[in-house]
Image (cartoon, helix red, strand yellow):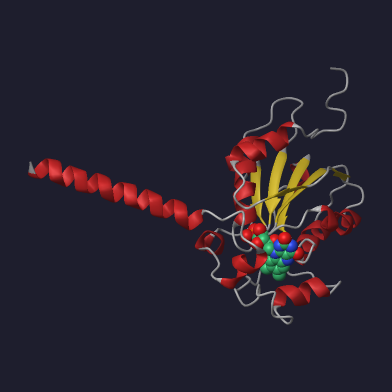
Amino acid sequence: MRRILALLAALALACGLTACGRTATQSDPSQSIQEEQSGGEIPSSTQSAPPGAATPDESEPPADGEPKVLVAYFSATGSTEGIARHLQTVLAAGLYQIVPEDPYTSDDLNYSNDDCRANQEQNDPDARPAISEDAENMEDYDVVFLGYPIWWGQAPKIIYTFLERYDFDGVTIVPFCTSGSSGIGGSLEDLQALAPNARWLDGQRFSGGASESDVASWVEGLELLPGADEGT
Ligand SMILES: Cc1cc2nc3c(=O)[nH]c(=O)nc-3n(C[C@H](O)[C@H](O)[C@H](O)COP(=O)(O)O)c2cc1C
């Protein structure tokens, strides 16, 4: 009898831990910007994520004629990271987190304060926050999915740093973002100007809670290589 009770207790503990883990990493898609920012804590998943280098080891070598795909993203509070990880799974792609050399604190992101770092950067056309580690073998990739949160209708300036750092000529760039409610449209013109010889596909906005199947449905309709549908 004692053994059965011990077994039941162990099971209950395991279930409890699983439930806690889920709550801590989920983001609420319906959060308004205010709601999202008022709490202020930056999820530990983002804070502790290893910086930088692309992880081609997690990607599979593409079959003949298939593009080599990298998912590159910046995420200050974890929402865009969730979408990036779905993409990595769906595409069997490499993953590169754009990590700021100087990480953003809650105060830095408190956009209701005019002087917060994020607002200052967004208001400064020359701001280019430094990235802590380069992506490896960028020249190997045919397609780069580029993810970011919307900040004041635009991409964070660290995305500009990223686009200026590499040669994207002939590369297909597929932008995606998360936001409180804003679309991706307003952020694209500036980004395209920084890599004018890339082949830019339409961008896609996701809520932070978008599922892997939401992401997969979007990817299914994309023409990742030019003329990929021709002759079929
Ligand atoms: C400085 C700042 C500005 C923001 N501006 C907007 C905005 O213009 N429109 C919007 O819908 N959300 C805005 N947001 C909310 C973020 O886009 C949203 O929380 C996003 O999902 C965060 O992604 P992340 O967790 O990957 O950093 C802003 C957030 C911050 C910190």
Height in image: 19 above or below 219? Answer: below
Q: Residue at x 86, y 71 (%)?
A: 125
Q: Which one is nearer the viewer's eye here, 99 or 178?
A: 178
> How many labels were placed on the picture?
0
> Residue 61 at what x, y percent from top left?
65, 32
Quadrant of residue 164 within the rendered picture = bottom right
Q: Residue at x 59, y 50 (%)?
A: 209
Asked whether, in this view, residue 212 is left or right of residue 116, the answer is left
> Residue 56 at what x, y percent from top left?
63, 43
> Residue 43 at what x, y percent from top left?
53, 63
Q: Which residue is drawn at 62% across and 77% down?
A: 107
Q: Which residue is drawn at 15% across and 46% down?
A: 6
- Whether residue 22 is visible, yes or no, is yes
Q: In which quarter of the image is the C terminus?
A: top right
Quadrant of residue 157 within the rendered picture = bottom right
Quadrant of residue 229 within the rendered picture = top right
Quadrant position of ligand 1: bottom right
Q: Which one is nearer the viewer's eye here, 129 or 184?
A: 184
Q: Quadrant of the N terminus?
A: top left
> Residue 64 at what x, y percent from top left?
73, 25
**Residue at the extreme top:** 232
Q: Which one is nearer the viewer's eye here, 76 or 164?
A: 76
- Whether residue 132 is visible, yes or no, is no
**Residue at the extreme bottom:** 115
Q: Which one is nearer the viewer's eye here, 161 or 33?
A: 33
Asked whether, in this view, residue 218 is left or right of residue 210, the answer is right
